[in-house]
Image (cartoon, rainbow, N blue to C red):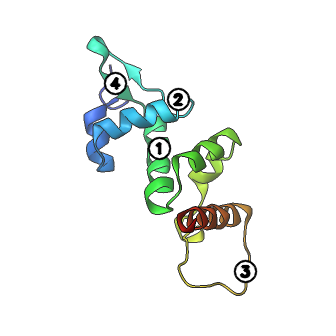
Amino acid sequence: MDSEYFVSINEVAKRLSIPAHTLRYWEKQFPTAIRPTTGAGGRRYYRPETIKRLETIKSLLYDRGMTIAGVKKILHNGEFGDALNTNKTETVVRTEPVTVIKNADAESIRVAIDYLEQAKSFLE
């Protein structure tokens, strides 16, 4: 295998600063988005496009505060490509009240709705 094209699970874990067991868990949760190539002995190797998907999943879960179910919904609706291309500054969840929404795009609204649904379930 070309070492520049395929990256081991341990290297990906280091790059993303998350444990390898989290990557294996995400493989089970998002099987359509994360499909590593397996080498001898069942070792996992990731292609660059898979690493980009992992970075997006990490951002959606950790930076934007989405749930696993929320990310699955994005994948199911075919909006994952949009999530890859969105600018992080456009989808930051604000903690202060917003009285006027200017130039809101559909993804920003979906992120806000997801955040509100999470807050609602926390309060219930």
Residue 8 place in picture, x, y as percent: 29, 30
Labels 1 and 4: the sequence-earlier one? 4
Residue highlighted by disc 4: 44
Write the residue at 53% across / 79% down.
95
Q: Are marks 3 and 4 in contact (CB under 8 Å)?
A: no
Residue highlighted by disc 2: 31
For the residues carrying marks 1 and 2, which lies nearer the camera in this image? 2
Say few, some or many: other residues with alpha carbon within 10 Å of mark 1 (under 14 / 14 to 19 / 20 or more): few
Distance of label 2 from label 3 (alpha carbons): 36 Å
Labels 2 and 3: the sequence-earlier one? 2
Residue highlighted by disc 3: 101
Write the residue at 61% across / 85% down.
97
Determine whether 19 is above or below 124 in the image. Answer: above
The image quarter in which residue 37 lies? top left
For the residues carrying marks 3 and 1, which lies nearer the camera in this image? 3
Write the residue at 29% across / 50% down.
17
Labels 4 and 2: the sequence-earlier one? 2
Residue 51 place in picture, x, y as percent: 43, 40
Find the residue positioned furthest to the bottom.
99
Distance of label 3 from label 1 (alpha carbons): 30 Å
The image quarter in which residue 101 lies? bottom right
Distance of label 1 from label 2 (alpha carbons): 15 Å
Between residue 117 and residue 5, name the one nearer to us. Answer: 117
Q: Is residue 106 left or right of residue 24?
A: right
